[in-house]
Amino acid sequence: MLLREVLLPFVAGAALAYLLDPLATWLERLGLNRLIATLALVFSFLAGFIILFALTGPIIVSELVYFVDNFPLYIKQMQGLATDPSRPWLSKIVGEGLGYAESSISDLMKLTNNWLGEVLRSAWSGGQELISVLSLAIVTPIVTCYLVYDWRKIKAVIDNWVPPAQRDTVRALAAEIDQKVGGFVLGNGALCLIMAAFYATALSILGLNHGVLIGAAAGLIGFIPYLGSLTGLVVSTCVAIAQFWPDWTLILAVPAIFLVGQTIADYLLSPVLVGRRVDLNPVWVMFALFGFGNLFGFVGLLIAVPLAAAIGVIVRFALKQYYASSFYIAKPVAADPQTSASGRPDDGSM
C-alpha cells in the first residue's frame, strides 16, 4: 500500500479520539464547553505521557543502552556454545546463523552510534524517519482534537448517508461494533499492563539481565496477539542461555515464566477483562494479523483485531438475514408423481 507509511498518525489520532470522546461528552454534560473539554483532555493526555516518559525514560534508555552494548557478547557466547564439539545437539538447535547475526548486530551497533548524525542529515535532506516521528508527535494531537470536537457531527453526517428505512438497523450494528471494539481496546490494554508488570517483576526476581526491559516490552507488545509473548520468550531465553549456562534450572525458569504468564492471561485474566467481546476464533485472529499486517504494515497489526471484530459483526448479521430469508427457508418443490423421469406426463401407455 502506497499510503501505509503515513497512516500511523491518523490511525493513532482516530484511536485516541474514539477513547476520549466519552470523556468529552461527560465533561460537556457537566456544563463545560465542547472545545474547552476537548483541549483539556488532549493536553492532559499529552502532559501525562510526557511526565510518564520523563520518569521512566532515563531508566528505559539506560537499560536499552546496556542491552545493546551486551547483546554482541550474548551472541558470541551462544555461538561458542553452538560450535562446541562436545555438544553437537546444541549446534543443531541453535543453528549456524549466529555468525550472520553477530555481523548484523555489529552493523546495527554502528548504525546506532551514528543515529543522531543520520537523523540530522535526514532532516536536512527531508528524510522519512524524522518526518514520521514529527508527524506522530505533531499531527496526532491535531487530528485527535479535530475528531473529538467534531465527533458528533461526523456521526450525524455518516448517519445521514444511510437511507432512513435502514437507519435503525445500521445504528444497531454500529452500537454492537462499538461495544466489541471498545471492550477489546480497554480490556486488552489493561491486560497488557498487567502482563508487563508480571513479566518484568518475575524476570528481575530471577536475576535475568535486562529482565525489566524485556518483560515490560513483552507485555506491552502483547497488544498485538501472540507477538509479545513469543518475542519476549525468544529474547529472554537467548539472554538466559548466555548468562546462566550451564545452570539449566535458571535457563528453563525463563520459558516457564512466559508459559505461566500466558496461561494466566488466557484462562484467568482474559475471560474477565476481554471475555467474549471480540468473539473471534483464534485462527481468524491469526489470519487477520497476517492479512492486515501484510497490507498496512505495523499499523495493520494494531488495527487487525478490532477490524476483524467489526467485520465479524457484519458477517454474522448478514448470515442472520440470510437464514431468515425466504430463499433459505423455502421448501423444495416436491416432484409430481404423474411426471415421468423424462419430464413428460405419464399417460399410462407403454
Image (cartoon, helix red, strand yellow):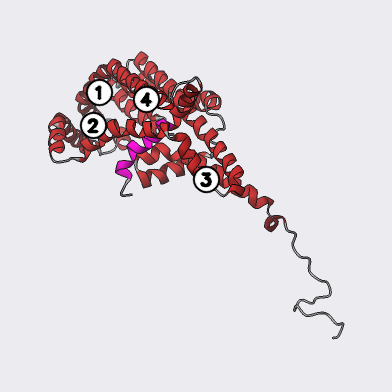
Decide which of tag 2 and tag 3 comes sooner along the chain: 2
Q: Nearer the viewer, residue 214 or 174?
A: 174
Callout 3, which amino acid?
A: Asn
Mark 4, residue position = 39
Q: Position of residue 282 (x, y in %)?
A: 51, 39
Q: Nearer the viewer, mark 3 or mark 1?
A: 3
Is 123 or 44 nearer to us in this picture?
A: 44
**Would residue 167 be found to the left or right of residue 113 on screen?**
right
The answer to whether residue 11 is visible is: yes
SS category of the residue bearing label 3: helix
Q: CA distance from mark 4 to mark 1?
A: 34 Å
Which residue lies under the disc numbered 1? 64
Q: Secondary structure at mark 4?
A: helix
Residue 215 visible at all: no
Task: Name the spot of residue 289 as percent of width and height, x first.
Answer: 42, 41
| Rendering coords of residue 271 (x, y %) | 55, 27
Disc 3: which residue: 160
Q: Which residues are magenta?
A: 4-17
Label 3, residues with CA under 10 Å away: few <14, some 14-19, many ≥20: few
First along the sequence among labels 4 and 1: 4
> Mark 1: which amino acid?
Leu
Q: Residue 274's spot in the image, x, y percent?
A: 52, 28
